Image (tube, rainbow, N blue to C red):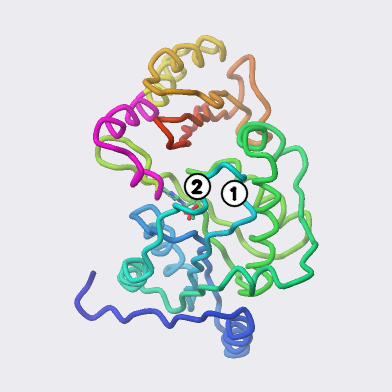
Amino acid sequence: MPPFATAPQVLRTSAEMTAWSRAAHARGERIAFVPTMGALHAGHVALLEEGRRRGDQLVLSIFVNPTQFGPNEDLARYPRDLPGDLARAASAGTDIAFVPEPADVYPPGFQTTIEVRDLARGLDGLFRPGHFAGVATVVAKLFNIVQPDVSIFGQKDFQQLAIVRRLVVDLAMGIEIVGLPTVREPDGLAMSSRNAYLSPAERTRALSLSRALFAARDRAAAGERDAHAVVEGARAALEVDRVDYLELCDAATLTPLVQIDRPAVLLVAAFIGRTRLIDNVLIGA
Ligand code: AMP
């Protein structure tokens, strides 16, 4: 952290957050927004740095959204580190950290859900029922509270980014959505708050995800057009306990491809022990 980075101002209620945003807009300022679930790492910092460049004001939200976790998922043990997050946010020049309580985001009587249909059907949508309805609803709500001009997301959550882009267009929200490449550890592992769950031995096996994806990308770049061959080559390289999905999809529609004849993305979700990791790589046509 740079020595004189000032800590962001922490706002804990949506009323305070919206009042602050209205005042910023009244001053003619542009608000950049990075929504997260906290446990910030260098991937999140890259989003904040991009937000810093794109806005007069930079807002980070930290909210572990209960509605996007399934009943057997890791909501209770999801890593939380507010002091560490605020230090990292400060180093990236964050002005505001919005840290609401679930009861503020979901007040008594809450009953509205936003569903993005086709994009949310496959991949994580199949293995995490209700997950993307939870994501789409909370993102829309956070957008209404924060009222950003631009919001920055990671391609690490490729399907989520596609869904957010769709949502913003479909509901005419008028917010610019920026997607940034996945930030990786030096050895290739995609940075994730969930990497903290991995034992050293699991961490070694987790590396097989990015290794398999990169090898598949290289194979496609060398001329292989058969999606099945590329996918099965990647599957053979995975050292995981269970694969939820490994699919080569159209990068725009996320529907599975037979031939690699357009911009594509190879996406994986797999368990290493109890830890579920996702990763993806873009594959040029
Ligand atoms: P989360 O980790 O769920 O709190 O995600 C908050 C935002 O950070 C989302 O837009 C993610 O796509 C993004 N993000 C998470 N991990 C990475 C990474 N390794 N590189 C870039 N962005 C990331």
Location of the N terminus by quadrant is bottom left
The relative height of residue 102 versus residue 217 in the rendered view (above or below) is: below
Q: What element carries label 2?
A: loop
- For the residues labelled 1 and 2, the Cα–Cα distance comes to 7 Å
> What segment is highlighted magenta in the picture?
193-211
* Kind of residue at badge 1: Phe
Give left or right: position of 200 versus 72. Answer: left
Instruction: Choose between 260 and 35: the one closer to the eye.
Output: 35
Secondary element at image label 1: loop
- Going 49% across and 54% down the picture, which residue do you hit? 76
Residue 71 image position (x, y, % from top left):
61, 45
Residue 259, magenta (yes or no): no
Q: Position of residue 285 (x, y in %)?
A: 55, 24
**Residue type, numbered disc 2:** Asp
Image height of 237 relative to 244, above or below: above
Check disc 1 and report the residue beneath it. 69
* Residue at image location 50% in from the left, 29% down from the top: 268
Query: What residue did someone put label 2 on?
Result: 74
Q: Is residue 210 magenta?
A: yes
The front one of 195 and 140 is 195
Q: Where is residue 183 in the image (x, y as percent from the top left)?
A: 37, 46
Mark 2 Cα-neighbour bin, 10 Å: few <14, some 14–19, many ≥20: some
